[in-house]
Amino acid sequence: MIPRPRPRILLLALAAAAIGAAFAAVGGATTLATQPSNTAPPSVSGTAKAGNTLTTTSGSWSGTTPMTFTYAWLRCDTNGVNCNSITGANAQTYDLTSDDVGHTVKSRVTAQNSAGTATAASHATGTVAGGTPPANTTLPSISGTPQVGQDLKTSTGSWSGTSPFTYKYDWRRCDASGNNCSSIGSHSDNQTYTLVDADAGHTIRVVVTASNSGGSAQATSKATAVVTVGAPANTAPPQITGSSQVDQTLTTSNGTWTGNPTSYAYQWERCDSGGNNCAAITGATATTYKTTSDDLGHAIRVVVRATSSAGSKSVESAAFGPITSNVPTGVTKLPSGELSIAAASVPDTDRLTIVQVTYKPSVTSHNHQPLQATIRVVDEHGYDVAGALVYVLGTPYNWLAKVAEAPTASNGRVTVTLSPTRAAPRHGALLVFIRARTPQGDLLAGSSTRRLVQFKLAR
């Protein structure tokens, strides 16, 4: 006997059913989103041959919609494994290149919705074949004037076969009939060629090599007319070398020319500080030019004129300068042309040098007559030092009368009197110790310098 439901339980069940129906009626029921799941893999269409375009489908997916799809292309081995992503290949189509020849290709599709992402790959294509090799349909042609110094330019010609093409160029020098050609190797791979002196009396051809995913092929242009020699043409301007100071010698090169110049002429010009508004310098027509005080603050340039049997041509150098003073700050130029610096301006790290000691007379007589000794002091730059303090001492000290420390003149020289004493021998030699220092310097260190000299004592 089956027991009958209790009235209270039956009543609760009916209430729950009614509440559920009410929620459903007003949209209160919820469904959880599910992430994408591939139900049919992507498929790739198109012929697996370099130069062709492949297209992939997205495949079929289950899961909550809407979904978005992203794409990637993979290059694999001939078995469709060992795949690597192809850089930049992220569209639904992919153009096969020569890099793909001998490989298979897959597409990889990533589906995304609100619940997540999932990825599926297509089957591999067949092994990618090479493209149709290039075949020339129109020869390359050369344009330009066949004259030394002029530029020739070649077209690529026209080609059939799988695009894209790449091109290389090999310019060749031939005899006057366009035969017996040899490669001008240093100019390969340039679509233009500047004719040089060696081309005079020859004709020129160019061999164009076209390459694509299927291979490469060559085509040779017709020969130019015989190359003639024109007036000189400059390919590199003259250059000025030297120091941009007053009283310095500047030198110019001829520059580089075609057309076999037989002679060169020169004209130096003085310009403003910016190298403009130039005017010829009278008499300055050699390969060298010595700057003068008139050039101070100006730039200098030179005009070189090249001449051959076919004519002449002039070209200017770049401006050089502006010309500055050759006298450093703190240094004075003496009327003699020597440069002088004050001893007070010589740092203690700059060692003085006693470069010259002269005597009058050169030999003292037996009666010990006095000598006039002239001593010259310079700094490490060779400038005469004005105001250096010079001290002289005989050795032994009692062989020479005491000499007071004396300053050098603006020319770095000081003359002192050396008087041998009665203690000095009547013949032999007298040894003299000389010291030079700056007024502010240390007696024994820093810029202070010393020197030993001797002079003869006559009988």
Image: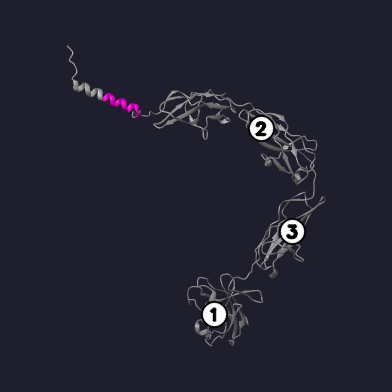
Distance between the alpha carbons at the discs numbered 3 and 1: 53 Å
Residue 20 falls within the magenta-colored stretch: yes
Tag 2 secondary structure: strand
Principal SS element in the magenta part? helix
x and y percent of residue 60 in the render? 46, 24
Quadrant containing the N terminus is top left
- Left or right of residue 291, residue 230 in this image: right
Q: Tell me which corner region of the image, top left, top right, bottom left or bottom right, holds residue 228.
A: top right
Distance between the alpha carbons at the discs numbered 3 and 2: 45 Å
The answer to whether residue 458 is visible is no
Front of the two marks 1 and 2:
2
Instruction: Tell me how the rendering is colored.
Output: one colour
How many neighbours does mark 3 have within 10 angstroms: few (below 14), some (14-19), or many (20 or more)?
many
Q: Amino acid at mark 3?
A: Val
Magenta stretch bounds:
16-27
x and y percent of residue 289 in the render? 71, 64
Where is 71 relative to 279, above or below? above
Q: Which residue is tagged 1?
A: 390
